Image (cartoon, rainbow, N blue to C red):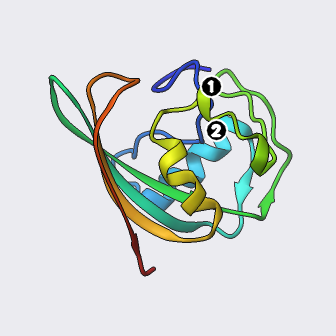
Amino acid sequence: KRGFGEGRWNGFGGKVEKGESIEESVMREIKEEVNIVPQDLKKRAIFDFTFDGDDEILQVHFFSATEFDGEPIETEEMRPQWFNENEIPFNDMWPDDKLWFPLFLSGKNFKGAFHFKDHNTILSQRIEEVDE
């Protein structure tokens, strides 16, 4: 609903606060965004995203969870929605998602990088499977 990727279907996320581990940040963000607490959080992927004209590297860590406490609710940050695998709205997501999300759904771990011209055009990409 707001923030980076506004207007696109996107996963839960945000920035790591000072003194917080990445895993603690994930737990906090999910609680803040949809009021659930993952019970089986597992790190699955890490990507570096860069954009033309911007020297910043946006490093994003991806996690999965199949069990959680609480009932998902809509907040000012997000309207949660779950999709069947064959109904994932890739056209309404970041363009890179359709390239790596099948690996994620298959249970694989991976890493990579994407360089974008703008928020809709991928100029280069690298994805490789990794062990845990």
Of badges 2 and 1, the one in the foreground is 1
Name, please, the residue furthest toward the right: 71
* Point 31% across, 22% down: residue: 118
Front-most of residues 85 and 34:
85
Q: Position of residue 36 (x, y in %)?
A: 75, 49
Identity of the amino acid at label 2? Glu
The amino acid pointed to by label 1 is Glu
Residue 21 appears anywhere in the view: no
Q: Is 53 on the left or on the right of 121, as rendered? A: left
Quarter containing the C terminus: bottom left
The residue at 57%/43% (across/down) is 29
Front in this rendered view, residue 57 or 122: 122
Q: Circle 1 is placed at which residue position?
A: 77
Q: Residue 32 shows which numbered tag? A: 2
Is 32 left or right of 111, judged from the image as shown? right
Q: Nearer the viewer, residue 63 or 124?
A: 124
State left or right for residue 2 relative to residue 33: left
Image coordinates for residue 54, horizontal then vertical, percent: 17, 27
Q: What is the number of the mark on residue 102?
A: none
Q: Are marks 2 and 1 in contact (CB under 8 Å)?
A: yes
- Image quarter where the N terminus lies is top right
Examine the rendered structure and indicate whether residue 127 appears above or below residue 10: below
Disc 1 packing (10 Å; few <14; some 14–19; many ≥20): some
